[in-house]
Image (cartoon, coloured by chain):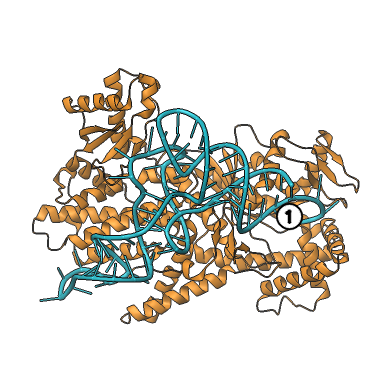
Amino acid sequence: MCMSDFQTYLQKTAQSIEDAREELNGRERTGPSVSWSEYPITAIQTEVRQAIMSVFDLTPDQLPDLEIEIPPEHIQADFAVAMFPLASVLRDSPQNIAENVVSYVYHSNEFQYLASAEAIQGYFNIYLNTLRTYQHVLRQVLMLGENYGVHPQFEEQRIFLEYSAPNIAKPMSIGHLRSTILGEVLGRLYERGGARVIRDNHLGDWGTQFGSLLYVYQESDLDLEKSEDPIEELKNLYVSFTERAKEDPELKERARKMFKHLEEGDSELIAMWQKIRQLSIDSFERVYEDLDVNFDLVVGESYYLPQARHVIEDVEEKGLAHRGENGELVVDSLEDFDTFLLEKGNGTTLYLTRDVAAIADRERVFDPDKILYVVGNEQALHFQQLFGLARVMDYVKSDTDVEHIGFGLVRTGGKKMSTRKGRLVTLEDVLEEAVNRARRIIEEKRVDLSDEEREEIARQVGYGAVIYHDLRHVRTKDVDFNWDQMLSLEGESAVYLQYTAVRIRSLLENLGNTDYALNMSADQLTLETSIEFRLAKHLSLYPWTLANALNRHTPHILCTYLETLASLFNTFYGSVSVRNTPDRSLRASRVVLILAVFQTLENGLDILNVPVPDKL
RNA sequence: GUCCCCGUAGCUCAACCGGAUAGAGCAACAGGUUUCUAACCUGUAGGUUACUGGUUCGAAUCCAGUCGGGGACACCA
């Protein structure tokens, strides 16, 4: 009977997993399907390939991958393609090849977008039909609206995405933000790529640390019911324990024993554990709600305890492991890395044991095409061991991609943050400070607004700053935590993008009714300045940017893209007055342009989970 | 000790994962608003890509070594 509480918990969790599976299977799709061929940028690429194939009489198979590049500033051309990969195929110099293609384009009238071209240093540089490109790009953006950028890269695939994964009984640190935000954004990127994503918050709710915690908690006079901030109190208990354990190694042993009792199902300990777990989940929920982060599944490590026992049996049975001198189970070395433990000497499970069980369960239940883990780089070895063992045990199919999407540490004072060592910046503190800083500025700038309006804006700007700071850096590099830098509200920051979006919205309001612009057909669109064309050209690259960010699992590519878009728009804004454009059709065209910019900016910010305020 | 990641302008970062004269923001300097939001725009200045060698048509990017910083390594997660 003593296991009954835990059994009930296991059953309820199993049911929630089953519900998620049903929901996933029933999920129609995450959005409409948009094929690559609908995008002008793809059509441009096709024309380039067509030209090359015609000139040299090649079949598509013979054509190497030719990427369309954006030429450096001193080159006038709109796009460029390097001919170097063709040189070995055609046994000719890149420059000659480029010249041949240029001459073909010059004499041909079969192209819609390619207007002219030039050959420079082995590059095939193309000049687009400005007007037609402008018209088609803008039309496409407005036609697809919030679906502009959707592409079929991972059409119909199932992606199992683990992220956030905070440890219970501790406040979320600024380090958890990286996993939480990266995971959320990657999920959204996959959905734009046509995938069905299952988001799993893999709670750290089991392990020897709870032996430690339950030990000090029992000893203390802390009353969780009456505490105002139970999580903070529990963290303090935990920190005090690790400090004492440093002096007194005996304490560690007691913690391990306590954990053993927990794993054996001691009903009193289970009850305490459940209470602490629920309190933690409640406190996490507040943060997730604030950040607009949503999970399909919240399953902790604890759920996999029974399955982890089976893993231990299976591995032993397969003869992949041996017992060490204290009875611990040692997995023999796999591939490139050394031996590692799967069971402790006292018969309890490890993080890795439960993770192996978890990956097997995910494969079995969800049959995913990919299983992705958004977890810090410092756990790289753990995932090597996990994936290695899961493969040899056939817990994952050979055609299932498993990948550790690692990210750099958030360091404080040049060192790793650590709860135990008291070097911790909590996420809630950071978000609060961010909102405070934003509030101070908005109170100065917009005395005309009500307190409620300013509070809402401060929240959106503050949260946006924190989220964006994390996203705009290359994922794998470490970042040093710095208040001023993280909460900077100028230059390359979320507020620049938010400001630009609000500026466009305000501009549109100022122009009154713009329905006439929406009703324009593509061939009525016209342009006058080079900045208008540069904007449209940049808009055309948005779908590729999404695919690129997705393939490399690096949202910062999208950040850079949006910053360029905003910068181009602000240049346009500074040099052209839409309202005072005398020519009616040119004015209407400009309205279409800014609508398209706004739409793309909004689509991108939505993926990055950065809110767009009404005013600023 | 072994393994992994990183080193780019004074500072914080990019460089589409081998391509053309390495780009932005901040800070500095010089300008711009009686006109659609100046949290903005325009311009100037700032570099031996830590160092040394190698690979090739071509290197910040790949390889080797050196220096410097960070991280992971059996009963934490």
Residue A549 as seen in the image, left or right of residue A380: left
Q: Is residue A44 visible?
A: yes
Which chain is assigned orange? A
> Which residue is farthest left?
A582
Taking the view exactly as shown, the residue that stands out farthest to the top is A57
A589 left or right of A484 in image: left
Can you give x and y, in whole percent of width and height, for residue A232 in the image?
Answer: 67, 73
Q: Amino acid at mark 1?
A: Ser
Q: Position of residue A294 (x, y in %)?
A: 53, 57
Residue A30 shows up from this direction: no
Q: Label 1 belongs to which residue?
A: A302
Q: Secondary structure at mark 1?
A: helix
Residue displayed at 51% across by 74% down: A432
Quarter of the image where the C terminus of chain A is located: bottom left
- Work out whether A47 lies above or below A459: above
A494 versus A352 height, above or below? below
Chain that is coloured cyan in the picture: B
* Label 1 environment density (alpha carbons within 10 Å; few <14, some 14–19, many ≥20): many
